[in-house]
Structures are given as structure tokens and as C-alpha cells.
Amino acid sequence: MDGDGTGSSGWTRALPARAGRRTNLALLGLLLVAGGTGVLGFAVGTPTAGRVIAVAHGAAGLGLLLLLPWKTVVVRRARRRPAVLRAPSAAWWSTGLVAVVLVSGVLHSAGAAGIWATSGTPVAALQVHVGATIVLVVVLVAHVWGRHQRPRPTDLDRRVLVRTGALAAGSLALWGAGEAVWRATGTPGADRRDTGSLERGTDEPTAMPVTQWASDTVPQSVGTDVQVVAGGRSERVAVADLAGQDTVRALLDCTGGWYATQDWGGTTLARLFTDRFGADVLTDAGHSIEVTSVTGYRRRIPVRDATTTLLATSAAGRPLSVGHGAPVRLVAPDRRGVWWVKWVTKVELVESPWWLQPPFPLQ
Ligand SMILES: Nc1nc2c(c(=O)[nH]1)N[C@H]1C(S)=C(S)[C@@H](COP(=O)(O)O)O[C@H]1N2
Ligand SMILES: [Mo]
């Protein structure tokens, strides 16, 4: 009847006849791991954890390719069913979007970020990756809806566990092979950081991209002082008084896919608070320090970070540019760029813990 049945080519006939429910579950599992590690990777800035997450993310994504032969069988079989013939759109959209997400992800990992660079925007591959993923999530929910692949107790039998292990090992091997290719060919991606970011403008703040999170914009005007608040007391500190007290060499790693290391100059949050409000002001570990931008953008830092976190007025010995947060910005070592609040107007010791906030800024 139709010419594309599974029997028509030798290699698909060799595949297990039961390719179906478990293939779909494995696909869903890989997509969930890839999606979860993708979101987590944006939240984590510490090297080792970042590395584990990035490898899992890459492997889970590439692992989808390993399931392609099985999924082809499933799709071909499904296409013989008239109901699916009539409404294939979600299925085709998900396939196309997965392809876009995979290709852009691989391009980014190869270091292709700069290839499509237009004025100061070196992050196109990663933006495509994230954008297509958001659309994919919507389409996938529509696609998976009504196709309940409920796990059964037998899904935990030994053969399945062995196959799951094989899939995980195969995915990791595929990821390792990709990395080996980048290294052998000297692709820029070979040098990327554990988080997957590429170096841009280390020790050269002017070469560093100016990046906003979501919808925030560079403000028209900024202040000349910072309001410091703790325990009902409030003081205004002139920006000039913050300059040059402490320096820290720290790496800014943007979720847009680039990083840069600079020598930042300013004053640590610990010094800022204890100089004004006494040595005991930061001793309650349940408290946090809320850092607010003139734009309303804000992040809460745990008090334990106060000694390493800087209110910075300079980078590489020169005053900050407006794009990079002048006159004062936060420098939060080991945290992703979203924490590095620019154009700071207020720092306040608050009683709530740091984790009581949206995981990413809302603006
Ligand atoms: N007020 C404010 N601060 C902000 C942002 C923002 O959108 N608004 N973006 C953050 C993000 S996502 C990054 S990566 C860094 C980028 O700093 P840069 O523009 O100096 O490179 O600033 C952070 N601080
Ligand atoms: Mo960022």
C-alpha cells in the first residue's frame, strides 16, 4: 500500500519490533535531562558543578541522535494510522525544532558564536538555541499530550537498565568525540570554559560585550552615590569613597555564552557594611544583601559572600563605562553574569534568605 513501510529497507527491519513506547520514554528522558541541565547551567557559576552540568547537557542532547533510528521506526509505523496522518503538525514541528536546537547547540559548542557576529552581538548561535528551545517546549507539550507513555513496573527490569546505561555511555562517548574533533581541528570551541562560554575581552573592558538580561536597558542617567541600609539605619555613600579600597580579579561569565576576567576595583560589601554599622552587622547567616539597580533590576546575595563580593567602580584600572554599569556595579565572583547588578543605587541587609527570590531576574 504505502511505499515507506518499515519492511522496505534492510536496516530498519533489523531493529527491535518493539521500538515504540520505550523509545519514546527514552527520548523524553533525554529531553528532560537536556532541558533541566540547560536551565541549571544558567544558574550555576562554580567550575566543577558547571562542568558536570555542561557535559550532561551536551551528552543528553547528542544522545537524541542515537535514538534516531528507533524513532524513525516509530514514526513510520504511526504514519500508517489515519488519525496521525490528519494531524502531524506537532510531530513535524518538534522534529524540526529539535534539529534547530541541536545544530545551534553544536555550533555554539564549536565556538561559532562569533561567526554571525553583527555589531557587538557575538551570541547568535546560543540565542537561536535558547529561542528554539522555548518554542520546542510549547510544541512538545502539545505533541506529548494525549500520547500517554506511562512507565510500567517492567520498565525497571535489568535489560532496560542495561540499555539505559548503554544509552548514557553512548551519549557521553558522542560528546567526547565531538570535543576531540574540536581539539584536533583547533576550533575556537576547544577553548571554551566549563560553562560553555567563550573568552571575550579579558583585561580589556572595552572589548567586553555590553549585555542586558531580558528586557532591561542602559539607563539615561545614574546617581553619584549608593544608599546603604541595615537594621533600620541608612547612609548615603559617595561613589568616590568606594573607589580603590579593595581589588579582586574575577571572571564575569554571561549566559549569553561569553566570559572575561578583569581586575575590578571598589569596596567589598563586608567592608561597606561593617565600616558603617559595626563588625557584627553581617553575622546572621539567614540574612541576605539585596542589591538594587537604578533600573529596578535586583539580586539578593548571601551574607557569607560579603567578603568576596565587590561594589566595583573600575575595571583594569579605569572607571567603568556606562554600558558596563558606571558608576558602580556588583562583582560577584563564581556567580553567573546575571548576579553582577549594574548601576547600583541601593544595597540593603534584609532578613530573608538569599534563596527566597526568583531564580532569575524578572527584568
Ligand atoms: N541592572 C542590570 N544589571 C545587569 C544586567 C541587567 O540587565 N540589568 N544584566 C546582567 C547580565 S545578564 C550580565 S552577563 C552582566 C553583563 O555585564 P556587562 O554588560 O558589563 O558585560 O550584567 C548583569 N547586570
Ligand atoms: Mo548575561
Image (tube, grey):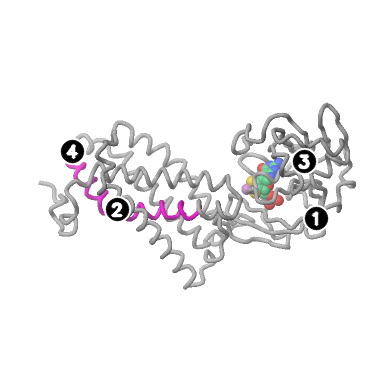
Could you tell which of marks 4 and 2 lies nearer the N-terminus? Answer: 2
* The magenta segment: 54-80
Residue under label 4, please give it.
81
State the mark number for residue 68: 2
Q: Is residue 126 above or below residue 301?
A: below
How many neighbours does mark 2 have within 10 angstroms: few (below 14), some (14-19), or many (20 or more)?
Answer: few
| Distance in Å between CA atoms under marks 4 and 3 | 60 Å
Which residue is at a point 61% across and 51% down the rendered structure image?
46
Of labels 4 and 3, the one closer to you: 3
Of labels 1 and 4, the one closer to you: 1
Can the viewer see residue 212 in this picture?
no
Task: Pick whichever, 280 or 9, lies toward us.
Answer: 280
Asked whether the residues under the numbered discs 4 and 2 touch, taking CB atoms below 8 Å apart as contact, a structural biologist would say: no
Task: Pick whichever, 346 or 272, lies toward us.
Answer: 272
* Residue type marked 1: Thr
Asked whether the residues under the numbered discs 2 and 1 touch, taking CB atoms below 8 Å apart as contact, a structural biologist would say: no
How many neighbours does mark 4 have within 10 angstroms: few (below 14), some (14-19), or many (20 or more)?
Answer: few
Residue 65 magenta:
yes
| Distance in Å between CA atoms under marks 4 and 2 | 20 Å
Residue 220 magenta:
no
Which residue is at a point 32% across and 55% down the rendered structure image?
166
* Residue type marked 4: Arg
Indicate the quadrant where residue 117 lies: bottom right
Task: Pick whichever, 54 or 158, lies toward us.
Answer: 158
Position of the C terminus by quadrant = top right
